Image: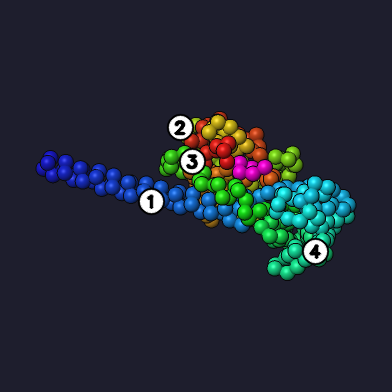
Amino acid sequence: MKHTIFLLLFFSIKMLTVAQTASDSSYSKEIQLWDQQRVLRLKSETGWLNLAGLIWLKEGTNTFGTEASNDLRFPVGKGAAKMGSIVLLKNQLTLIASDNSITVNGKPWQSGPAFSDHDTAQPTLFAYKSLRWFIIKRGNRYAIRLRDFESDAIKNFIAIPRFPIDVSWNIEATFELPAHPDSLLVTDVIGLTTATPIGGILHFIRDGKKYDLIATLEEDDKLFIVFADKTSGETTYGGGRFLYTNLPKKGASTVMLDFNKAYNPPCAFTHFATCPLPVAANRLDLAITAGEQFLESH
């Protein structure tokens, strides 16, 4: 009888071990696929690796081209000496092309409105050989965001270093709505501060200690977290990392914080981005040894 009980216990433990191993393997594959998709997004036409410039506009006429005399200088060898001008007058922007080489949607562009507050999700995209650019607005300022589809950063990019995948960093957190609708003042790397709606406060426990993170709410009902921790500036990017999670399902009060999916902001890959910085409340006294790491060689 004792022998039978021992065998049953042995096989039960073995089956649990096999099931756990299969679960861990499935989770590792999930994170590996997430990594692959992340790299593909970085290298895509809308990714961050092809950024070649963030050029701020002044009120009045802004000439652009590759010649040094232009107000806005494009990369040498990537365009004509004089390509045109952008006129900024009282928040109205007009792009005037010098010839028919600049196109929009494959058609030559001569002159017309270059930016609208109503079209920020799909701005007018100008093209010239390997270059693409559009206008962005930050506060009351406007800039050209310039892309180069033949960027060396894309050609030389291999992979993003990361910590070993560790399922223990996929942590269940308690979700709490703020007592009343509130906003978080978020400052970015260029010093601009923006009031952003708070989506919730997330409480989680690691090694017996409680930690809190404030999440903002994205348009697609995702919770977005910008955080820093004790690895920031050491093995991870000094400006913090990003993390997304879903809002709790109806009737639920918890969300999952999968720090294996914590990733570097665009500013870790380019000087031409305007990334938000972690607020004081999201600077954790904890070493989160999960997710993406950072090397200066990027």
Determine whether the residue tagged by mark 3 lies in a helix, strand or loop. Answer: loop
Determine whether the residue tagged by mark 2 lies in a helix, strand or loop. Answer: loop
> How many residues crowd around disc 2 within 10 Å: few (fewer than 14), some, or many (20 or more)?
few
Residues shaded magenta = 267-271
Is residue 91 in view from this perspective? no
Residue to which mark 2 is pinned = 207
Counting from the top left corner in percent of width and height, residue 47 is at: 61, 53
Mark 3 or 1: the one toward you: 3
Residue to which mark 4 is pinned = 99
Above or below, 144 relative to 118: above
Q: What residue type is labelled 2?
A: Asp
Question: At 47% across and 39% down in the image, what residue appears?
Answer: 163
Determine the CA span between mark 4 and mark 1.
Answer: 55 Å
> How many residues crowd around disc 4 within 10 Å: few (fewer than 14), some, or many (20 or more)?
few
Q: Which of marks 4 and 3 is nearer the N terminus?
A: 4
Residue to which mark 3 is pinned = 162
Question: At 68% across and 46% down in the image, what residue appears?
Answer: 273
Counting from the top left corner in percent of width and height, residue 97 is at: 81, 61
Q: What residue type is labelled 4?
A: Asp
Determine whether the residue tagged by mark 1 lies in a helix, strand or loop. Answer: helix
Counting from the top left corner in percent of width and height, residue 160 is at: 51, 44
Q: Which of marks 4 and 1 is nearer the N terminus?
A: 1
In which quadrant of the rendered view does residue 201 lie?
A: top right
Q: Earlier in the sequence, mark 3 or mark 1?
A: 1
Question: At 44% across and 49% down in the image, what residue appears?
Answer: 32
Residue to which mark 1 is pinned = 26
Q: Is residue 31 located in the magenta-colored stretch of the structure?
A: no
> How many residues crowd around disc 3 within 10 Å: few (fewer than 14), some, or many (20 or more)?
some
Is residue 156 in view from this perspective? yes
